[in-house]
Image (cartoon, helix red, strand yellow):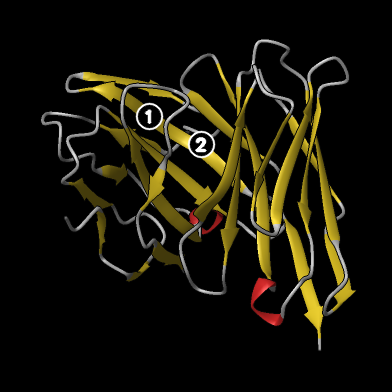
Amino acid sequence: NAGVTQTPKFQVLKTGQSMTLQCAQDMNHEYMSWYRQDPGMGLRLIHYSVGAGITDQGEVPNGYNVSRSTTEDFPLRLLSAAPSQTSVYFCASRTGYSTDTQYFGPGTRLTVL
Amino acid sequence: GENVEQHPSTLSVQEGDSAVIKCTYSDSASNYFPWYKQELGKRPQLIIDIRSNVGEKKDQRIAVTLNKTAKHFSLHITETQPEDSAVYFCAACSDGNKLVFGAGTILRVKS
């Protein structure tokens, strides 16, 4: 199993550009989520999904969209990038049980100029 | 919603000493408390977790304790080694679906 994969690993955008961060998992996990990591602020939940066709907002959803058309994929879209969205983005997945281990992808480092 | 506070933000210990990191949470309904270790440039990885029906759990040099009444939980690392140097995050699962993280503790083990 590849586990949780993310692409790209690095990305530089200009203010106002849009892009999609890709996330996929091959563990048949129902639950997937996106976090952003900023220095001194830990990991903050952006959006999450409990299954295909179902998504919900986390702590910091503004400026981001998600969709979940398949169990495997959970892309994160930046609609109009802003410098405040410069961060490291992690995708994660687990089974449908809230007490099961959550596995993280390798992360995407995004810089918005 | 859930709020998790973590202390200290940085911790330096001598190799062989113990390290303790403490977290408090606000939602009494939270029932799952994992700890993650993140090395520089890497993804967070689970090192130990505890569920709300257990007071203590140990795995070799690592242990976690949970006090539901006081709403706090702690990570204990004994006989620290240089490879324990990393950032450690606590988290609490609230609403059954949201894993809320603390701000992290930078642990430095000096040899």
Between B31 and A105, the one nearer to me in the picture: B31
The quadrant where residue B11 appears: bottom right
Is label 2 in a helix, a strand or a loop? strand
Question: The N terminus of chain B is located in which quarter?
Answer: top right
> Would you say the residues marked 1 and 2 are in contact, meaning their CB atoms lie under 8 Å apart?
yes
Residue B100 in the figure: left or right of residue A94: right
Residue B44 in the figure: left or right of residue A8: right
Q: Is residue A92 above or below residue A98?
A: below
Between B59 and A69, the one nearer to me in the picture: B59
Q: Amino acid at mark 2?
A: Leu
Identified at 43% across, 54% down, the residue is A89
Question: The C terminus of chain B is located in which quarter?
Answer: bottom right
Mark 1 to mark 2: distance in Å?
Answer: 8 Å
Q: Is residue A46 above or below residue B26?
A: below
Where residue B50 appears, x then y in whole percent? 62, 32
Is disc 1 surrounded by few (<14), some (14 to 19) or many (20+) residues within 10 Å?
Answer: many
Residue A27 in the figure: left or right of residue B82: left
Q: Residue furthest bottom?
A: B111
- Residue B103 visible here: no
Residue A72 in the figure: left or right of residue B102: left
Where residue A67 appears, x then y in whole percent? 22, 30
Q: Is residue B33 above or below residue A18?
A: above
- Residue A89 visible here: yes
Where residue B7 appears, x then y in whole percent? 86, 48
Q: Which chain letter matches label 2?
A: A
The residue that mark 1 highlights is A48
Q: Amino acid at mark 1?
A: Tyr
Identified at 41% across, 52% down, the residue is A90
Q: Which chain letter matches label 1?
A: A
The residue that mark 2 highlights is A45
